[in-house]
Image (tube, grey):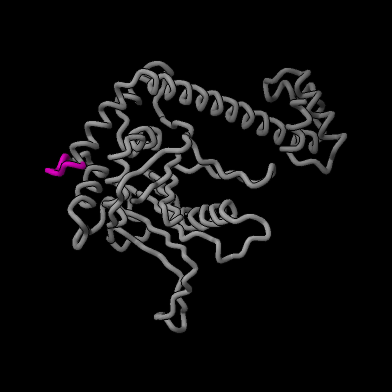
Amino acid sequence: MNKISLIYKRRNIRTREKGVNNMYLKAWENLDITDDFLFGKVMRNPEICKQMIEAILDIHIERIEYPEEQKVIDMTADSKSVRLDVYVKDTKDVIYNIEMQPVKKDNLPKRSRYYQGMIDLNLIEKGDSYKNLNQSYVIFICCFDLFGRNQCMYTFENHCIEEPDISLNDGTVKIFLNSKGNLSGKNTTLKAFLSYINNGTLAEDSFITSLDHEVKKAKENLEWRREYMTLFMRDQENKELGRSEGKLLNTIALVRKKLVKGLSPEDIADILEENVGTIEMMTHFILEYPEYSDEDILKEFKK
């Protein structure tokens, strides 16, 4: 009997609407399975998650279990950590990482490479034999065609260029699904799943019926709604902070240019319509540390 471990991650919620309360309410009501927050919540249902994995990989799974809520791979204090949407491990120790990706980003191939490498580093202890590395899959569920060949699934393994029939057999596979691609030759449930992702189509499929029910059920969960709002407001605060820092960096760059022209802090403040004290402080750091970049000056300014 297969036993699978699933782990989730939470990400910042992003939206372009204006007005925090109205924006949050509208955004929440419009969420669908392509939003990674809702995707993670819906995949807490073991039967739903099991059927999704079976459809994507065309395999049979007896059951799944959830030993922990979140999978974060953080090898060192100064390295870039990885927070995974869904992280699956079966009784044969095969690893499956599944990511929901509604927005096209050209860095996905490199991102899949990074995820694969971090998963491997997380799997093997220092001094362990390389033969102990698990077979692993990194899967992106995309709402677009990353490679422009109209396939609904692009599967990558490592093969020899000179002798294509020679497989490296390193145990790694990367898959990019395209919800808008050619579905011919794929199983019925995968076709229904990708159509549902694409436009919410309710096909005559028991999995899709259950999935849609679970999506609606999740959106009625008040605790998750509040969690979403908290994440959303935190994201807005971060954006405001970013805009504020961007404005300061722009001011520092302008002050630097005006100083080269021989203008005094008072004159610069008058031209830029800024507080004299602020301009004087920026001037001090620029003159004190001429080798500093604008970003370095901003760090000094914020101390």
Residue at 74 percent of width and 26 percent of height: 302
Check the image and report above or below for 263 versus 109: above
Q: Read off the magenta span.
A: 202-207
Residue at 85 percent of width and 34 percent of height: 287
Residue 13's spot in the image, x, y percent? 44, 31
- Residue 250, picture quadrant: top right
Check the image and report above or below for 126 versus 25: below
Residue 23's spot in the image, x, y percent? 38, 21
Check the image and report above or below for 250 versus 161: above
Locate the C terminus and report the quarter of the image it occupies.
top right
Q: How many marks?
A: 0
- Residue 46, picture quadrant: top left
Residue at 43 percent of width and 18 percent of height: 20
Residue 262 or residue 68, whichever sits in front: 68
Q: Is residue 264 left or right of residue 178?
A: right
Residue placed furthest toward the left: 204
Residue 43's spot in the image, x, y percent? 35, 37
Residue 214 or residue 126, whichever sits in front: 126
Residue placed furthest toward the right: 288
Residue 279 or residue 159, whichever sits in front: 159
Residue 120's spot in the image, x, y percent? 55, 56
- Residue 48, picture quadrant: top left
Residue 299 or residue 82, whichever sits in front: 82
Q: Does residue 101 show up magenta in the picture?
A: no
In terms of secondary structure, what is the magenta stretch mainly?
A: loop
Residue at 12 percent of width and 43 percent of height: 204
Q: Is residue 245 left or right of residue 100?
A: right
Residue placed furthest toward the bottom: 163
Q: Is residue 183 left or right of residue 114?
A: left
